């Protein structure tokens, strides 16, 4: 039986003004997974964490961002990076 993902992002786009930061991003994180987010300044690392934490919504997604259970309170933009630890 396949593990159920704790977080699902499907074909997510996010940008600010005319600048596209994330384009067609798909991510699934299961319990016990270890994930590293690496990139240059401005490549969308913090934006990705804010999307995962629910502090921001994608401009486009083929499916809603889902969390089977969310043990932390809804994050704000300023706390998303600190609250984005998954069990």
Image (tube, helix red, strand yellow):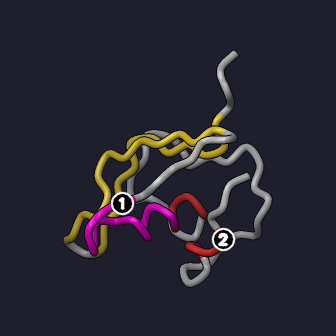
- How would you rate the neighbour count of disc 2 (Cα within 10 Å): few for under 14, some for 14-19, many for 20 or more? some
Q: Height in image: 82 above or below 78? A: above
Q: Residue furthest bottom?
A: 78
Q: Residue furthest top?
A: 1
Q: Left or right of 17: which side holds 71?
A: right
Query: Magenta stretch containing residue 41, yes or no?
Result: yes
Q: Would you name the residue on which mark 2 appears?
A: 83
Q: Height in image: 80 above or below 64? A: below
| Range covered by the magenta-colored residues | 38-49
Q: Quadrant of residue 70?
A: bottom right
Q: Would you name the residue on which mark 1 appears?
A: 38
| Comes first in the chain, label 2 or label 1 | 1
Q: Pointer 2 and pointer 1: residues touching (CB < 8 Å)? A: no
The residue lying at 50 percent from left, 64 percent from top is 49
Query: Magenta stretch containing residue 50, yes or no?
Result: no
Closer-to-camera residue (36/15): 36
Q: Left or right of 45: which side holds 80?
A: right
The quarter of the image holding the N terminus is: top right
């Amino acid at each position: 039986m396949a593990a159920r993902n704790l977080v699902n992002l499907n074909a997510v786009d996010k940008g600010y003004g005319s600048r596209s930061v994330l384009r067609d991003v798909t991510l699934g994180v299961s319990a016990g997974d270890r994930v590293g987010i690496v990139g240059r300044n401005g490549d969308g690392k913090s934006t990705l964490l804010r999307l995962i934490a629910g502090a921001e919504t994608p401009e486009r997604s083929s499916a809603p961002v889902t969390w089977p259970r969310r043990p932390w309170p809804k994050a704000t933009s300023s706390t998303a990076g600190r609250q984005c630890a998954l069990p």
